[in-house]
Image (tube, grey):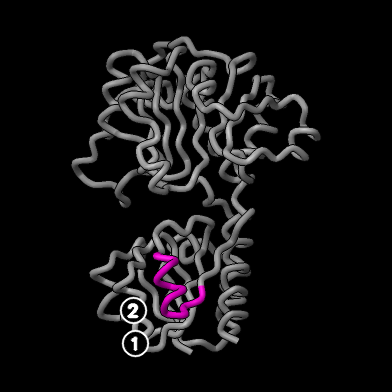
Amino acid sequence: MKILLTTTSFQDTPGKHHDLLNAQNWDIDYLRGPVEESILLPIIHEYDGVICGDDKYTREVIKAGKEGKLKVLSKYGVGLDRIDLEAAKEFDVKVSNVPGINQVSVSEHVLALLFTFSKNIHLQYNSVQRGSWKRGIGSEIQGKTLGVIGLGAVGKELAKKASALGMKVLAFDIYKDQDFLNKYSEINFTSNIDDIYSECDVISLHLPHTRETDKLINDIVITKKLKKQPIIINTARGKLIDPIAMISGIKNKQIKGYLCDVLETEPILENEVLLGLENVIITPHVGSRTYENVENQGKIAVSNLLNLLK
């Protein structure tokens, strides 16, 4: 079996996931993703399977793979929006992912971003490194209202953690998980997303990128629906927001800050429009990149590939 591994988190983090991979006696090639269509097209036919990150698996790539040896795409991670699932079904290429694995690490990252921004940690750290003792004034998160858009695994974990920290939590999802809400009665639920926009001091996005969610946070939402100058946090997908509208919203004080772990194009471009803005914090898609999570996620991704190849 010839296997392609492209996820950099898997490659860069030591752990038992490497032991499991190397024990399979596969012929393994490595690329550093996300890998675009132009790179995959001429090589994908050589591989029986791929352990992939956010590579671009278009219909053309999957078709070219099927004309060769390709049988399985094992996604290291949850989101499948970069894989043409209809094409995979058409050409009988099996696709797997690792659901319900990122919630602890990503929800912690959301809170890390929120604390950093609210307490001016990033600004104060840099000023002290320059020898300054100029002290800013931060804000508490206790008592603030957090809006969680997307009450899946990560959204639920964040809601529980935020509530334990003394935040009021209002969640929106197209599906109402009544069992979860019964268990955690302190978490409020709304079926109207506009309630999130009007009532929340902090809004955190936990949605896949689809046609329906593309640029969910846009000029209309920012100028017409936001009422409390919220902090917006995005650890899900860069295309959930309109960056130009976001910048305008910050400059016009309709948004207090934008904290993100994802961008529309990754890795970051030299001309990224969100770069260099004081009220924007960007981390390089590391929310799930903890030793514990990478090892667990990596082992499952290898096991999925192994089982589907069998």
Left or right of 274, for residue 256 = right
Q: In the structure shown, which secondary structural element does the residue marked by tag 1 occupy?
A: loop
Q: Relative to the observer, which residue lies in front, 25 or 39?
A: 39
Separation (CA) of disc 2 from disc 1: 6 Å
Residue at the right extreme of this rendering: 183
Residue 284 occupies which quadrant of the picture? top left
Tag 1: Cα neighbours inside 10 Å, few (<14), some, or many (≥20)?
few
Residue 157 occupies which quadrant of the picture? top right
**Residue 183: which numbered mark, if any?**
none
Left or right of 221, for residue 21 = right
Q: In the structure shown, which secondary structural element does the residue marked by tag 2 occupy?
A: helix
Q: Per the image, is 76 magenta? A: no
Residue linked to disc 2? 63
Residue 56 position within the rendered picture, expressed as x and y whole percent measured from the top left: 34, 63
Residue 55 position within the rendered picture, expressed as x and y whole percent measured from the top left: 37, 63
Question: Residue sitting at 43 percent across and 26 percent down?
Answer: 125
Question: Residue sitting at 62 percent across and 25 percent down?
Answer: 170
Report the magenta residues as a range.
Answer: 84-94
Question: Residue sitting at 40 percent across and 88 percent down?
Answer: 69
Tag 2: Cα neighbours inside 10 Å, few (<14), some, or many (≥20)?
many
Q: Disc 2 residue type?
A: Lys
Residue 3 position within the rendered picture, expressed as x and y whole percent measured from the top left: 45, 81
Looking at the image, do the residues carrying marks 2 and 1 touch, with CB atoms under 8 Å apart? Answer: yes
Left or right of 76, for residue 186 = right
**Residue 67: which numbered mark, if any?**
1
Q: Relative to the observer, which residue lies in front, 207 or 55?
A: 207
Question: Residue sitting at 55 percent across and 26 percent down?
Answer: 192
Residue 230 position within the rendered picture, expressed as x and y whole percent measured from the top left: 46, 19
Q: Disc 1 residue type?
A: Glu
Looking at the image, residue 180 lies above or below residue 122: below
Q: Relative to the observer, which residue lies in front, 2 or 79?
A: 79
